[in-house]
């Protein structure tokens, strides 16, 4: 199965945070699953780190590169189809990063690993 990670799921997995559920951690550890991190999440991490709302202990550029190398997770680029799909999404979720993740999940037909219940208002499978 291919999985799209919400930003917090990626960070919590990499940091061993107990806020990540056992089910989510199991899904992310399973080598049978392909795990994708959206460029939108990389952008969100960089913005939050730059605003000092997220402490990574190193620049986001090296943190993300190192985390991807350690986990084997792959980057999901933002395609034009993903970006324009946001236009037709209902405004149930206001966060622009999450709206793009939702659009990517819909367009790619893949589930999202996220604790954000607001995703449930959209036609995506949320695993947590």
Image (cartoon, rainbow, N blue to C red):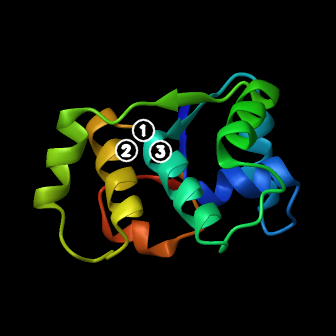
- Quick one: label 1 or label 2, which is nearer the N terminus? 2
Q: Residues within 10 Å of mark 3 (few under 14, many from 20)?
A: many
* Contact flag, marks 2 and 3 (Cβ < 8 Å): yes
Disc 1 to disc 3, how far (Cα)? 4 Å
Residue at x 64%, y 61% (from the top left corner): 8
* Contact flag, marks 1 and 2 (Cβ < 8 Å): yes
Q: Residue 57: image x %, image y %? A: 84, 56
Instruction: In this rendered view, identify the residue nearer to me: 51 or 78.
Output: 51
Q: Residue 29: image x %, image y %? A: 80, 36
Disc 2 to disc 3, how far (Cα)? 6 Å
Q: Which mark is residue 110?
A: 1
Q: Residue 40: image x %, image y %? A: 43, 48
In the picture of the structure, the residue carrying the numbered disc 3 is 111
54 sits left or right of 50 in the view: right
Q: Which mark is residue 105?
A: 2
Among the 4 quarters of the image, the one containing residue 106: top left
76 sits left or right of 11 in the view: left
Quadrant in the picture for the C terminus: bottom right
């Amino acid at each position: 199965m291919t999985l799209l990670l919400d930003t917090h799921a990626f960070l919590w997995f990499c940091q061993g945070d107990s806020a990540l559920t056992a089910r989510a951690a199991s899904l992310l550890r399973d080598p049978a699953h392909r795990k994708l991190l959206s460029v939108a999440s990389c952008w969100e991490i960089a913005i939050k780190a730059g605003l000092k709302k997220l402490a990574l202990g190193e620049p986001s550029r090296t943190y993300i590169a190192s985390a991807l190398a350690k986990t084997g997770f792959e980057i999901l680029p933002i395609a034009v189809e993903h970006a324009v799909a946001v236009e037709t999404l209902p405004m149930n979720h206001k966060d622009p990063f999450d709206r793009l993740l939702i659009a990517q999940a819909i367009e790619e037909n893949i589930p999202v690993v996220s604790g954000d219940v607001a995703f449930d208002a959209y036609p995506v499978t949320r695993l947590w």
